[in-house]
Image: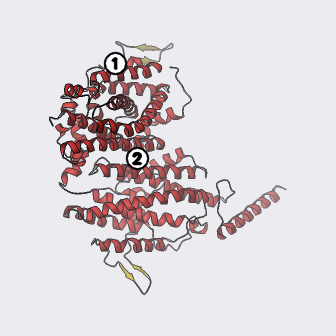
Amino acid sequence: MSTTNRFASSQAYAERNAKFKAHIDAGGMVEATDWMPDEYRESALKFIEMHANSEIMGALPEREWIARAPSLRRKMSLTAKVQDEVGHGHMLYRVAEDLGKSRDAMITDLIHGRTKFHNVFHYPTYTWGDVAVIGYLIDGAALVTQKALLECSYAPYVRVLKRICAEESLHQRHGENLVLELCSGTPEQRQMFAEAVDRWWEPIMQFFGTPTTGRRDVLLEWRLKVKSNEELRQRFFDMFVPKLWDLGISVPDDKLAYNAEKGEWDWTEPDWESFWRVVKGDGPMTETRLAWRRWMHDAHAWVREAMDSPTRIAA
Amino acid sequence: MSDPRLHLLLALADDELIMGHQHGHWTGVAPHIEEDLAFSSISQDEIGHSVVWYGIAAELSGKDPDTLALGRPPDGYLNAILVERPPRDWGYTLARHYLYDTAEDVRLATLAESSWTAVAGATGAIRREERYHLLHARLWLDRLAKGPVEARSRLVDGLLAALSEAPGLFEALPGEDELVAEGVLPVTHEQQRRRWLEMITADLSGLGLDHVLDGESHHTGGEFVPTSSGELLTDERGDAANGTTGGGLGGRHGRHSEDFAQVWEEMTGTYRAHPGASW
């Protein structure tokens, strides 16, 4: 009878899977304690883990400027901002943990280069202009993406995203404020920002991903995301390109223009080869940043032990 | 800079700014995510407090707070040497955090009684935040002191290194007699130092750590030989004898350690490179 049992159980899986899919397609939500297909669980975990990793790695390029901030006010606000990003990583790792991977395992995989994080956090920063671009355009790009995710099917992620989006909106305003100060400041300050936009434009275009892949996107199927790469990129153009032009800042893409006939922006595709190299761990700062994190992690293993250890020395 | 009142404010403000600056080096890279968040908050608080003191100093000197904070030459800074040291490891960071915040507690309690109302008034809001710093510092002191062995040992090393320079926090200010006579400084720094020493002696004794006050680590020295019954061979006691008195002085007169050059370079570089710019 064992073959029948096996047959029966796989039938059951297929049935449950189909029922789950119908629930998702009808706009249903999923909780951590619900039954879910393995494919859903693994996809949700990969996606949220990558998001958490990106928040943690995204703290590094900006934190370098806390010590070098040009005023007391900026020193405090940049600290608060990076603190928020670390806090987002903290919340997201907890959501990911409930899907079945410990925070420790996720941190270990990250620092050994076994899991991924967003391409934009693999690059160096050179001036305060980079801080402004990260705060304005990169946080802006992330906000466009994250707002769209509020409609995804995994309820614990949506709850955390609501808080993240609220804080990211503040960061965005903070970023805009930095940009306005630079653009209305000295010629050097303005130049600083213009050069940073030139440096970051291609990585930002890559950040949204390729327009079409021709391959099946499992995340879209499970409604772990709801908008395509191109829809999000177009929304980013709508929001930011006119503002940059108003400030007299040009964007390094000669083709970039709104095409009224098509109802969308024409733009130049970036070098996708370099995108793949970077996200697979061969970016200009990938190894430096991961090696530093590994070193910090190893050097402070004793602190984690002290926090977890039942060992207690009598005073 | 000959005004003793300005000296007092700049010593307070510079300590807070540089301490906050050093704590900020953990933002994004602390050993634990929860601690990363906590330390970033403490760092912001300290810098926020420096803004309060620079604000009063600005009224007195006619220079704006950013110019005071980021626009002075290295020998114009009056912070204690203790706060300009790099964060080193978590053991040193926590030990310094504990010693600094206990010293702050004594200092602010003193200034709350100052005859200078602007200063006495400013202490209220600052002390409300500092209370949490002290709770945080004591929690960690207790946790590390109670093990595991490596944690306690690193805490002891951190305490020894930080204690040797902590007296600099209570170095007499130029013109201190005048400040005391006017009641601006209700008691001298030497008296404050003694109050602080009582406070930390009570904490450290409670954890069996009071020997660090004498500059003794009581670490196991020597080489362990894995013979049948084991041998621990040593020629001397394993103490790194650090004096705990008289160290870390000079800061209140603008005399700093070799580490300060780097702090100053990093902290003021962007500001100095763009004179007159607004950020």
Q: Quadrant of residue A242?
A: bottom left
Q: Is residue A10 above or below residue B171?
A: below
Observer-nearest of A92 and B228 = A92
The amino acid marked with disc number 1 is: Gly
- In the rendered image, the residue lying farthest to the left is B2
Residue to which mark 1 is pinned: B215
The amino acid sitting under disc 2 is Gly
Q: Is residue A100 left or right of residue A263?
A: right
Q: Residue B165's x, y, as percent? A: 29, 26
Whether residue A278 appears in this view of the structure is: no
Q: Quadrant of the C terminus of chain B?
A: bottom left
In front here: B3 or A123?
B3
Residue B122 drawn at (x, y percent): 33, 39
At 36% across and 73% down in the image, what residue appears?
Answer: A241
Chain bearing tag 2 is B
Q: Quadrant of residue A173?
A: bottom left
- Indicate the secondary structure of the residue bearing disc 1: loop
Q: Residue A167 location, x and y as percent?
A: 46, 57
